[in-house]
Image: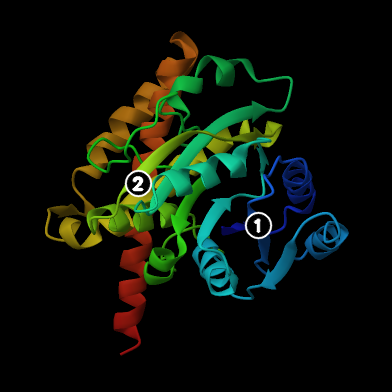
Amino acid sequence: MFVTVAICTFNRAESLRRTLASLTAMRVGGDLAWELVVVNNNSTDHTDAVIAECRERLPLRREFEPLQGHSNARNRAIAAARGEYIVWTDDDVIVGAGWLAAYAEAFRHWPDAVVFGGRIKPRYEPPVVRWVAESERVLGGPFAIRDFGDEVQPLSVAESRIPYGANFAVRMAEQRAFRYDPNLGLAPNRRRYDDEVDVITRLLASGAKGYWVPRAIVEHCIGRERQSIRYIAAFNEGWGETCAFRDANATAQSLFWFGIPSRIWPRLFVWGLLYRVCRYVSPAPFWVKCLQAYSYNKGKYHYWIRRRAESAKAFAGR
């Protein structure tokens, strides 16, 4: 069996160094051949130097994608990959020693399956901010925490049992047929997500089988800059923008007030008020949940503001 591990990276040279170090420490059986494809998505830091340092210790190939955007980088990795499966992870994780071996075992055990996903555990930079530690159970999205338990089980869209981008795998034949949407994923001047969720959802909807692989474990490194209200708010604004973009056609048929879907206004007001009040009087998990709901609707609001401005500009240019 030959497997491709793929990482897309942008301006995280030192974080990437840590991830590559964890890949050198993996335990890989002699019956598994693998390659590592690292896509430099037009970084301006010393990413290439870090990649070059690791070439003698890893079966590594560097690819370059000049068009910035996570989906563009993913699609470049697909074009370069030679494996029978492609295993995706990120430049801010530490992979477990048995991570790739667990996936290889799953590929052999379920040869008819197409999609696989594994655990993502948080690894906090100390000292951990107190309200973050208290609120971990409601921060699964911003910190990409994913854990469906110790038992193997089928992936399911209906039950929201879908892996996250830092730890999943796809059989290559299907991955080449199901590419990543350039309108989704992080990109310059745009904060959208769900590029991998979109692909996994489409694969499962097509009838493909998928499995949760509990022993395929990575740790997601949560630096101090992410243990902040600003980061949590920004993430959820991006999530709101993502959902607004994906639901735009259906939403366009609804009632609008001042160019914004009418249902967004009361949600902005209520969640914003709750957050501002509860920030000082409620337990952290509750006010963090309020912050996320407020920021999510704020992201939807900003999406429709920008869309209205773009439409006005296009109309004026006729």
Residue 132 in percent (x, y) is at 57, 21
Q: Nearer the viewer, mark 1 or mark 2?
A: 1
**Residue at which label 1 appears:** 33
Q: Quadrant of the C terminus?
A: bottom left
User: Which amino acid type is shown beneath numbered disc 1?
Assistant: Ala
Residue 228 in percent (x, y) is at 60, 30
Residue 278 in percent (x, y) is at 42, 16
Q: Secondary structure at mark 2?
A: strand
Residue 210: assigned label: 2
In this orientation, does residue 293 appear? yes
Q: Quadrant of the N terminus?
A: bottom right
Q: Determine whether 129 is above or below 3 in the image.
A: above
Mark positioned earlier in the residue sequence (1 or 2): 1
Q: Determine whether 50 is above or below 288 in the image.
A: below
Residue 288 in percent (x, y) is at 45, 24
> Which quadrant holds residue 28?
top right
Q: Counting other residues with Cα less than 10 Å from the Cα at mark 2, is it few (<14), some (14-19), or many (20 or more)?
A: many
User: Which amino acid type is shown beneath numbered disc 2?
Assistant: Gly
Image colouring:
rainbow
Relative side of 55 to 83, left or right: right
Q: Counting other residues with Cα less than 10 Å from the Cα at mark 1, is it few (<14), some (14-19), or many (20 or more)?
A: some
At x 47%, y 43%, the residue is 106
Distance, label 1 to label 2, CA atoms, is 23 Å
Relative side of 187 to 256, left or right: right
